[in-house]
Structures are given as structure tokens and as C-alpha cells.
Amino acid sequence: MAQLLELDAEVLAPYLAELTGCLADLMHRAPVRILDLGSGPGTGSLALAHRFPMAAVTAVDISPQMLHRLDKQAAAHGVADRISTLEADLDEQWPQTGQGGPYDLMLAAAFLHHVADPARTLAQAFERLRPGGLLAVTEMDFFPRFLPEDTGIGRPGLEARLHAATNTQPPHDWTDRLTDAGFTVEARRPFEIRLDRTSAGPALSSYAQVCLAKLRSHATEVLDTDDLAALDTLLDETQPHSIVRRADLSVRTSRTTWIARRP
């Protein structure tokens, strides 16, 4: 999962720049303290540290392995002095997260749907955010699509069938939950991401391989045998039509961000 998230951030760097730019436009003042909730390997923390060069970022996650990866990445990006990590279970009472008063900005990226009690999590976020501060809740609508309609393997439309079979969860909508917690929702911002190979960069093939392999692990019981065989051929790096050998990949996906302010 850490590899998937890091590849996601590398390939979708234009989206992260757009997202953090949107937050910068809505801030009443430049943030000094930022909290990244459920940070994982810290791709959001790094993006926020680069966008807001005067801010200190605290990344909180339950996984010490994820936080260790973030420590290494922060050092590699030259921001280790501004990113600190905190291992904590955010389903429990939140720990004290440093000195310096309430936070100016919080990010919860693909995190809130994992917690046991979102209302409790949002209440704790509200308590630790300064008046006028922002909370950004982002959700990945589903895995990206990468393949052309006809891959040259099996029937056309394989990726569409794979997504239809594995995307079984209803879409998230945090508007009412944020309002109930006392926030004012200032924006519900959809991001439509369309990147060709040039825009996506050299990590595109690895990103597509990891994402499609992840979906393949959930598809055994929901795709027919012909589609499974075609997908296995695409994932086989030794095959001429394999994902890692293709020049016709692109990224098509969408993300949604709720930006809420504490009054």
C-alpha cells in the first residue's frame, strides 16, 4: 500500500499541486501548524510542506512502518526539519500533538472512511483547529483507469468491466457530517484528472501495474475466466502486451475534496 500511495503522489503531482493551491487560496493567513491525519507514507505531508514553506507539519498514523518511510522521504526532500511524525490510533482519544496552540490546517486524505466513528473524529479535529482554520477531507472516487478500450488482449472493455465488478462501495459524502460537527463547508471540489504519458511521467507504468494488480486480487470471483486470463496476461511483464511495455497508457480518475472551516 505504501508503494501504491507513493506512486500515486508521483504520477498525480499536478493534482496535488492543484489541491494545495486551492487550500492556499482559501486560507485567511499562511498556516504555521498543519496536521496530516492518517498520513500513511506522508505524500500529503510532503505536498503541504512544499506549498507552505513556513509551516511545521505533523503527520499522524497508526503504522510505524509508514511513518518511517515518511521520515526517509522528508530527509530526501530537504524538509525533515519541518515534518514530524506521531504514531497514534486516531480511533482512540487523540494524544497531545505538540506545543504551539491549535492547528491552522488539517488534511484527512482517503482516511475518514477508515475510522470507526467519523463523528467522534471530526469532533476531535474541530477541537484542535483554530477558529478560521481549514479541514480538507479528500476521497479517491475509485482506482484510476489506465488502459485503452481495446488492449489487443481479449474482448474490448476489460478495464471497464473490472471496475464495474470491483467498485461496489457507495460514494462518500461528508457534507452533513462536517456540518453536524460544527464546520462550515466552504467547498465541495471535484478534481477530474486526465494525464497522458508525458504529463504522468516515467512512473506511470509502475503505477498502472500496481493498481491493476491490486484490483486483480479482488476480481477472482467477479470476473469471467476469459477476462481474468486477459488481465493476467497484461500483468505478466514477460508478455509483449504487458502493462509495463505499453506506450498507450494514460491516467483517468477523479478525486473529491470537502474544504470546511471552523467558524
Image: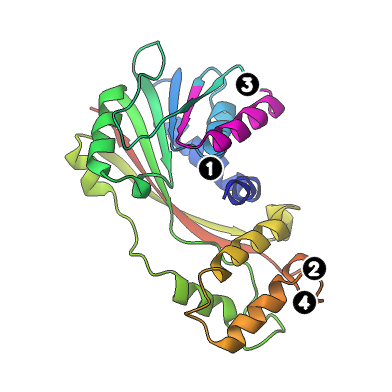
Q: Earlier in the sequence, mark 1 or mark 4?
A: 1
Give the residue at mark 3: 80
> Is 195 located above or below residue 94 in the figure?
below
What SS does tag 3 mark? loop
* Secondary structure found at label 1: helix
Between discs 4 and 3, the one toward the N terminus: 3
Disc 4 + disc 3, Cβ < 8 Å: no
For discs 1 and 3, the disc positioned in front in the rendered view: 3
User: What residue did someone put label 4 on?
Assistant: 241
Label 4 residue SS: loop
Residue positioned 60% across, 81% down in the render: 228
Label 4 to label 2, Cα distance in Å?
Answer: 7 Å
- Front: mark 2 or 1: 2
Give x and y (percent) for residue 97.
39, 20
State the separation of the CA atoms marked 4 and 3: 41 Å
Which mark is on residue 103?
Answer: none
Magenta region includes residue 58: yes
Q: Which residue bears the numbered disc 1?
A: 18
Q: Secondary structure at mark 2?
A: helix
Q: Taking 82 as reference, is 260 left or right?
A: left
| Mark positioned earlier in the residue sequence (1 or 3) | 1
